[in-house]
Amino acid sequence: MKLCVALDLPEFEQNIALARELKEFDIWLKVGFRSYIRDGKKIIDELKAINPEFKIFLDLKLYDIPNTMADTSEVIAKLGVDMFNIHASSGKIAMDTVMKRLECVEKRPIVLAVTALTSFDEDSFQAVYEKDIDTKAKQFAKDAYESGIDGVVCSAYESHMIKTHTSEKFMTLAPGIRPFGESAGDQKRVADIGFAQEELVDFIVVGRPIYQSENPREVVKKIISRL
């Protein structure tokens, strides 16, 4: 299991300062919507300059028509990131088109497909998808697996089930991790490290418990000691 630290702070300088504080650790860094829209490729280049061994997860959750998703995926693959994601609900044709396009990339990033956002509870999810989370997450994961996607974004609660219906090597990345039982905030389906380990999660994403701490470095050190 790998730790992925979410760089979700309001300002470029704050995210860079956090990365510098954590530069000694073997971790992934997640660059999300706000950071990438504001800072663009500059933030990726700066993070790699701080520590070339940092792994970058570009969390943009692509969702569009298949050809547009494939075009964008090809551009992302040339940014120097190590992983990015698309929405599984874009469909098998879109996922297959993305993966076929990336065949031309010499060293392509890991591609994950989003199943059910961890901000959903059962009622709000069914209002959109008209089925329960487990059913749709399993379907989305199987579609992604059959399309050649490397893994999925899901909550820790779906990870083991997804691997059972796909492959133990099919990666799962779980946001909404509260390592030591911290407040859930706006997330609904949260889990601690122990549960994520039991559910065979490959990547845990931790944001607020780290960057809102008075000593982010010590929090990261404590998390890694558990992994």
Image: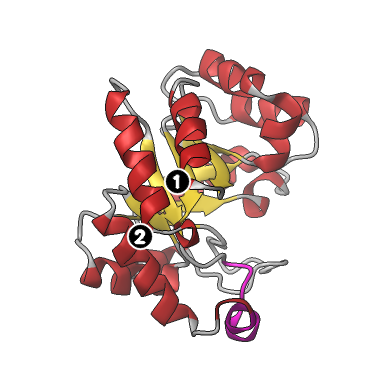
The 10 Å Cα crowd at callout 2, few under 14, some 14 to 19, many 20 or more, is many
In-image side of 142 versus 76 (left or right): left
First in residue order: circle 2 vs circle 1? 1
For image coordinates 62% across by 50% down, the residue present is 207
Q: Can see residue 24?
A: no
State which quadrant residue 92 falls in: bottom left
Work out whether 109 lies above or below 214: above
Furthest-right residue in view?
10
Residue 171 at x, y percent in the picture: 31, 53
SS at mark 2 in the image: loop
User: Label 1: which residue?
Assistant: 3
Residue 101 at x, y percent in the picture: 35, 33
For image coordinates 33% across by 57% down, the residue present is 144
Residue closer to the observer: 90 or 24? 90
For image coordinates 43% across by 59% down, the residue present is 91
**Amino acid at pointer 2:** Val
User: Label 2: which residue?
Assistant: 201
Inspect the magenta stretch and tell me whether residue 122 lies in it. Answer: yes
Inspect the magenta stretch and tell me whether residue 103 lies in it. Answer: no
Residue closer to the observer: 212 or 141? 141
For image coordinates 72% across by 33% down, the residue present is 37
Residue 23 at x, y percent in the picture: 53, 25
**Amino acid at pointer 1:** Leu
- What is the magenta segment's predominant secondary structure? helix
Work out whether 97 lies above or below 107: below
Mark 2–mark 1 Cα distance, whole angstroms, equals 11 Å
Q: Which residues are magenta?
A: 118-127
Residue closer to the observer: 167 or 139? 139
State which quadrant residue 167 falls in: bottom left
